[in-house]
Amino acid sequence: MTRKERLGNVKRILVKVGSAVLTGDNGIDLNIVEQLVADIAALRERGLQVVFVSSGAIASGKHRMGIEGKLKNLPQKQAAAAIGQGRLMRVYSNAFGKHGLYVGQVLLTMSDITDRKRFLNIRNTILQLLEWGVIPIINENDTVAVDEIKFGDNDNLAAMVANIVEADLVVNLTSTNGLYDQNPNNSKKARLIPVVKEITEEIEKAAGEEGTEAGVGGMRSKVLAAKKVVAVGTPYIIAPGKRTGVLQEIMDGKEVGTLFLPSAEHLNSRKYWIAFTLRPRGRLVLDEGAVQAIVHDGKSLLPSGITRVEGDFVIGDAVSCVDVDGNLIARGLANYSAEEMKKIIGLKSSQIEQALGYKDYDEAIHRDNLAVTIHHAEKPKG
């Protein structure tokens, strides 16, 4: 299948642009903004809906205050974001206005989407903006976010938002041409990888750790974001953000950047929320039989398959399920607290009431609340 055929049914695109693309020596590069906005406006003329995740607030605030180099602490970053976010939105409002388009600002923290009701409310708000023909411009609410409620970087934020709005395609515009088999800054032999069918350890290793002074996320964070996006069945493209008309080239099916193909077995929106949005409060170590039952047979997790309980969690908290080697297998919502789980480890469902004095559920985690995060393991023979 060609790229053009693969992207032929795309109706809603999430475009993420990083600080390394947007910023120049004098803060926000207005020429790049105008170029990018014209490209997005052209997508709208094609009848496509566009959700826009933009970095640049902190960089803009730093420039306004005449600060060079890295900011020293969290309060400085938050203050710079407070100054820069308004400036950034004014720039976008003016640029989109030239094309007859309105913009709407949506600032998020991780806690906004870990709560299911707030998650759904955010989705309804963004979908209403799209229905009105408005371009939602989304950023992390850096002025209030602390480590406990931070997305980490806007690559991760974009992956989360893609699930919220059920995007048909995610395009991550960056300062490179795409993903290379090795760091192009260190090797002349580095080659661009045009298509990634599966995100393996080798692919993650090729991404490395490099970032830029302007932004938090390097190529590795983009690949990890791609891993989350393709898990829900959405293609993901890393492309050069400063290239004129790059979004039009992508929608024309041209071989631009690196295309990550969606997983054949993908999660629905709710299970994606469980797998990648919620922060696990504990960990369950599973025996081989439980791993096979969950990954290959689509079964619930029973107490009999648990060998160890770690952490301090309550009923309904997200927990990670790992194999004996510590490899993440799934994440799910616990039917019992950590204290209760420790009392029923290895027991059959029929023995739960005897151990606890009551039995609310047969399962430690029901399959409807269990999101498998690994699909490529082969079932043992025999």
Image (tube, rainbow, N blue to C red):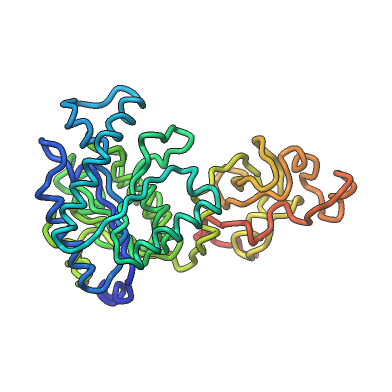
Quarter of the image for residue 85 reads: top left
| Residue nearest the observer in this picture, 301 or 18 | 18
Give the residue drawn at x 49%, y 66%: 265
Residue 357 in picture, x, y percent from top left = 89, 45
Give the residue drawn at x 64%, y 61%: 368
Can you say whether 255 is above or below 209 in the image? Answer: below
Residue 24 in picture, x, y percent from top left = 12, 39
Can you say whether 143 is above or below 352 in the image? Answer: above
Residue 99 in picture, x, y percent from top left = 15, 63
Number of numbered callouts drawn: 0
Can you say whether 42 is above or below 205 in the image? Answer: below
| Residue nearest the observer in this picture, 280 or 256 | 280
Does the rendering let one see residue 202? no
Left or right, residue 40 beside residue 264: left
| Residue nearest the observer in this picture, 111 or 160 | 111
Does the rendering let one see residue 183? yes
Left or right, residue 68 beside residue 228: left
Can you say whether 109 is above or below 170 in the image? Answer: above
Give the residue drawn at x 51%, y 64%: 268
Quarter of the image for residue 57 reads: top left
Look at the image and tell me in which quarter the C terminus lies.
bottom right
Look at the image and tell me in which quarter the N terminus lies.
bottom left
Residue at the top extreme, as displayed: 72
Residue 376 in picture, x, y percent from top left = 49, 60
Give the residue drawn at x 30%, y 72%: 7
